[in-house]
């Protein structure tokens, strides 16, 4: 199965992952702390995937809201092989723009 | 509608939360709860909001809207990590260390902030009320720094799995073996304060996946698939502008 990684960056392109629209809407509402959007997104995930999936999705979103802070606040680098393997993908997705305006 | 939280997740969230009120390695229980309270306060800070809108956070100066009595560099670290972590740089880190925060205090503070952020985001996303901050327990910090910690990988020294001595807790889950925490560099990020690393990773692995389950694509361990988990992880990383 090939996935479309652009959807991870723009939040709108279909990634090809089942129920991506519902799950990404939950992630975006949670990170934005938007309680109105969250209510709708939760309902949509439960309707499509069930209540256990909603809880597990909430847990993944929350865990990565924490661990991204750990990565960014320690300056921990990607492992060299992983960095080398993802050069093209990172360029295509413009991930390296996140290195700008650091302070 | 209130969904049921699986038992291991509920237990590990509760354990991590309780640890916040206990003396750590470099902060007392009262100080750790103050860090937790300030993590929540940072979301309402006008200076942080202005910095977030600026092309560079360094362009905006002023005083943080603070809720607790902690040293100024601790307040600065809590607020920036909570509100603008994607734009943190090494020069900023060096400035908070130069202002008086020790590297060990910084790492333990970071683990507390991360636990509060993850716990609050989970409750918010799941439609549950935020937990009340834990009660403070008496005790003094252990002030133990791993003898084998070395500089070079991150902004601060880290303790590689093979540099751990028998005096340190089992932070990489070497026992009973094989080693469970063999993942990327991010697992080393909090290793300068082993107990803080353990508190975070024990909670995080039940929110995401433990290492062996993460690498086992032959079955799904959650009610969402590996692909759905990784998609959510990547989308949150992008929203938080995380380079890792």
Image (tube, coloured by chain):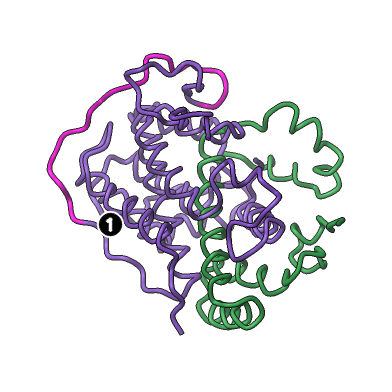
Q: Is residue B103 magenta?
A: no
Q: Chain of mark 1?
A: B
Residue B206 against residue B107 in the figure, above or below: below
**Direction from residue B28 to residue A71 in the image, left or right:** right
**Which residue corresponds to the image point at 57% horizontal and 31% vertical from the top-left?**
B182
Q: Is residue B153 magenta?
A: yes
Q: Chain A drawn in what color?
A: green
Q: Nearer the viewer, residue B102 or B91?
A: B102
Count all numbered tags in the image, as a single digit.
1
In the image, which residues are magenta? B135-155
Residue farthest along the left direction in this orientation: B138
Q: What residue is disc 1 on?
A: B67
**Direction from residue B208 to residue B105 in the image, left or right:** left
| Secondary structure found at label 1 | loop
**Which residue corresponds to the image point at 32% horizontal and 41% vertical from the top-left?**
B72
Residue A7 against residue A80 in the figure, above or below: below
Secondary structure mostly taken by the magenta-highlighted segment of the chain: loop
Q: Quadrant of residue B22?
A: top left
């Amino acid at each position: 199965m090939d996935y479309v990684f652009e959807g991870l960056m723009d939040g709108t392109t279909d990634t090809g992952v089942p129920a991506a629209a519902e799950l990404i809407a939950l992630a975006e509402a949670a990170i934005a702390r938007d309680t109105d959007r969250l209510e709708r997104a939760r309902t949509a995930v439960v309707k499509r995937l069930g209540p256990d999936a909603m809880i597990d999705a909430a847990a993944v979103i929350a865990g990565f809201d924490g661990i991204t802070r750990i990565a960014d606040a320690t300056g921990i680098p990607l492992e060299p092989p992983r960095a080398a393997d993802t050069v093209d993908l990172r360029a295509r997705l413009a991930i390296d723009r996140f290195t700008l305006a650091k302070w | 509608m209130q969904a049921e939280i699986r038992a291991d997740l509920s237990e590990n969230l509760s354990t991590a939360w309780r640890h916040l009120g206990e003396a750590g390695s470099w902060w007392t229980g009262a100080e750790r709860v103050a860090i937790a309270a300030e993590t929540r306060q940072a979301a309402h800070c006008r200076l942080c909001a202005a910095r977030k809108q600026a092309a560079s956070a360094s362009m905006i100066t002023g005083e943080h809207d603070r809720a607790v009595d902690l040293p100024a560099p601790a307040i600065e670290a809590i607020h920036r990590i909570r509100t603008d972590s994607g734009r943190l740089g090494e020069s900023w880190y060096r400035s908070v260390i130069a202002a008086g925060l020790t590297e060990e205090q910084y790492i333990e503070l970071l683990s507390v902030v991360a636990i509060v952020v993850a716990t609050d985001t989970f409750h918010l996303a799941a439609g549950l009320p935020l937990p009340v901050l834990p009660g403070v327990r008496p005790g003094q910090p252990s002030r133990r720094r791993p003898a084998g910690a070395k500089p070079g990988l991150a902004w601060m020294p880290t303790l590689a799995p093979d540099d751990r001595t028998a005096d340190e807790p089992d932070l990489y889950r070497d026992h009973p073996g094989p080693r469970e925490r063999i993942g990327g560099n991010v697992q080393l990020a909090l290793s300068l304060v082993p107990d803080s690393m353990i508190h975070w990773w024990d909670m995080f692995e039940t929110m995401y996946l433990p290492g062996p389950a993460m690498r086992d694509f032959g079955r799904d361990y959650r009610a969402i698939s590996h692909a759905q988990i990784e998609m959510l992880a990547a989308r949150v990383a992008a929203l938080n502008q995380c380079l890792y």
